Image: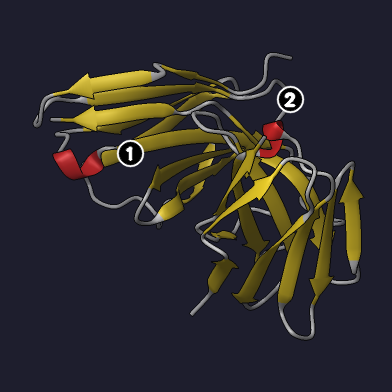
Amino acid sequence: DAGVIQSPRHEVTEMGQEVTLRCKPISGHNSLFWYRQTMMRGLELLIYFNNNVPIDDSGMPEDRFSAKMPNASFSTLKIQPSEPRDSAVYFCASSWDRGRGPPDTEAFFGQGTRLTVV
Amino acid sequence: KNQVEQSPQSLIILEGKNCTLQCNYTVSPFSNLRWYKQDTGRGPVSLTIMTFSENTKSNGRYTATLDADTKQSSLHITASQLSDSASYICVVCTNQAGTALIFGKGTTLSVSS
């Protein structure tokens, strides 16, 4: 498996523009996570899907952020309109959630999308 | 408040030397603790996962320890290599499903020749 695939790797956009980040999780995984990483705050969970259903979106900073998972092999994170403070590296990760049993499920991260909003 | 604190913030060591990174947490409930390695420009990669009952776990030259009583963990790197230069992130999971993760801000390790 190629691992978690994110696109684009880098995105530079002007303030006010819409940005869409894409993620293909590892085949067979049923959990997908979107994270944001900045120097100041480190890694922060934005939203978590299980079986394509959003379970916890409490980390989504504002209504400008939205995420979808139309099927088990694809997810998007959209920012509209984008602002300079959204500049960060956005990671997608996937894992297999057994639902019960030992809590040792490993999450595999993609390479991230570095977003710069100018 | 759930928090994960790591020390030192950064560390420089010579190739071949050992080092130990620290992680203190105030997280409840506790499910498991993970150490991740993040190379520059890459996503984090899991090194170890330890549950409440595990005191130590090794992955090659990496050995993680966990003291659930004092809520402390350490990551020991033996015979460091240049490729060990990375950020090491301590993460505490608070739920059974492994989805509620509290991240530390990481320790940046630089190994020089």
Q: Residue B40: image x %, image y %? A: 52, 32
Which one is earlier in the sequence, the residue at label 1 or at label 2? 2
Q: Is residue A106 visible?
A: no
**Residue in the image at 67% along x and 21% along y:** A3
Horizontal side of residue A43 vs A87, given as left or right:
right
Check disc 2 and give the amino acid type: Gly
Name the chain letter of the residue that bears numbered label 1.
Answer: A
In the image: residue A62, left or right of residue A24: left
User: Is residue B58 positioned above or below B25 on the image?
Assistant: above
| Residue under pointer 1 | A88
Residue A28: which disc?
2
Q: Residue at x 60, y 25 (%)?
A: A25
* Quadrant of res B64: bottom right
Relative vertical location of residue B17 with respect to residue A11 in this rendering, above or below = below
Q: In terms of secondary structure, where does tag 2 sit? A: loop
SS type, badge 1: strand
Does A26 sit left or right of B76 as displayed?
left
The image shows residue B63 at horizontal and vertical percentages of 85, 54
Instruction: Tell us which disc is closer to us: 1 or 2.
Output: 1
Dot 1 amino acid type: Ala
